[in-house]
Image (cartoon, rainbow, N blue to C red):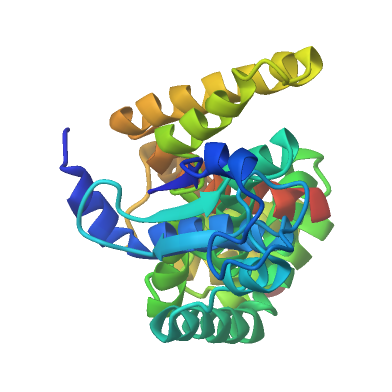
Amino acid sequence: MIVPGWIISLVTFPGVIVHELAHQFFCRRMRVAVYDVRYFRLGNPAGYVTHESARTNLQNFMISIGPFFLNSILGFCIAFPSATAVLLFNSDKVLDVVNVLLGISIAMHAFPSQGDGAGIMKRLKRRDTPILQKILMTPCVWLIYLGSIGSMLWLDVVYGGVVCLLLPMLVIRSFA
Amino acid sequence: MTNQPNSGSETSANMNRFCEKCGISSVEPGYQTPLCANCRSSLVYRPVLSYIVMFCGIICVLMLISYARRGRRFRVYIANERASRAEASHDYATAEIQDKIVIKAYPFYDDGFVRLAKDSYAHGDYAETAYALDKLNGHELDSDTADDLNQIARDLDAKHHSFKRRVQQ
């Protein structure tokens, strides 16, 4: 089923905001100047962070993939108290449902966008980039592109479901 | 949704050594964009919009409420898992104890009552079996589970009658 991107972004806007906040957070950590931030808008892209080029490729890489970590961790933490209640005990309490839906909406925006991948690739293509960095980071960029294409097949939603529903179940099992 | 590294001033960085923003000559080294430390700091620590801060606050409050109200449920989730494992390893006494924790927290959880009925019956706690079967009375279950429970109910009934006969004798 094809749903316009702006509708998905509108429904899952918390994820878009967290995604851009993650870029901005990593820019701060890497001391990279941010020229412009748009946390959410109805358009393509749904949000963006325009920043200067980082000092190193690794910093640039971290800024680009930062949302993968922040969105995944935050989505998991939000859904964790309610995931088992919803999945196993069919809880329909507002707090449980809100937690799970909010968690999924955040985690599903964890994938770096094609623009993020292009930013890394641009740096990797430079002549002065060490060969080891090219070898290690290029597959990551391919994965980013793959994830981006997969989003058209709802891979991002599947990922959100895995992080917010299945992962909490596995954590509970590991404690039992 | 993207981050866009702006490399438009990369060439100008090599050409002049003045801050792009304020024009002073002490630019921070190591960057392609010529910016002085103060100007870079102001851009790095660009303030987050107030409605975004509010949004973050709401998420934090929601998480606090969730963990405060649902934190105790982790014990129940773990009990549920332990009950399944104990049942699989035929440790029905443990399974029954864990089942009771689960159904106390989720009194409408049919699967919990089904498991309690089976575990308590296997453990020999027939009063608990009768209670669980009573709770499941009239509920829709899949045919295999219903067959199993009906068999337990018939066995329990037979045991009850033989007990009554023994008492009467």
Q: Quadrant of residue A149?
A: top left
Query: Which residue occupies 65% across, 86% down?
Result: B68
Image x and y of residue A61, in percent: 65, 37
Residue B129 versus residue B97: which sits nearer the camera? Answer: B97
Q: In this rendering, would B27 be left or right of A64?
A: right
Q: How many marks?
A: 0
- As drawn, B113 above or below B91: below
Residue A157 versus residue B41: which sits nearer the camera? Answer: B41
Image x and y of residue B103, in percent: 59, 71
Question: Is residue B125 visible to the viewer in this orientation of the structure?
Answer: no
Query: Which residue occupies 73% across, 20% down?
Result: A128
Question: Is residue B131 visible to the viewer in this orientation of the structure?
Answer: yes
- As drawn, B22 above or below A142: below
Query: Which residue occupies 68% across, 78% down?
Result: B71
Residue A128 versus residue B148: which sits nearer the camera? Answer: A128
Q: In this rendering, would A88 be left or right of A76?
A: left
Query: Which residue occupies 18% across, 53% down?
Result: A7
- As drawn, A109 above or below A103: above
Image x and y of residue B120, in percent: 70, 59
Q: In this rendering, would A29 be left or right of A39?
A: right
Image x and y of residue B41, in percent: 67, 71
Residue A36 versus residue B75: which sits nearer the camera? Answer: A36
- As drawn, A40 above or below A116: below
Q: Quadrant of the C terminus of chain B?
A: bottom right
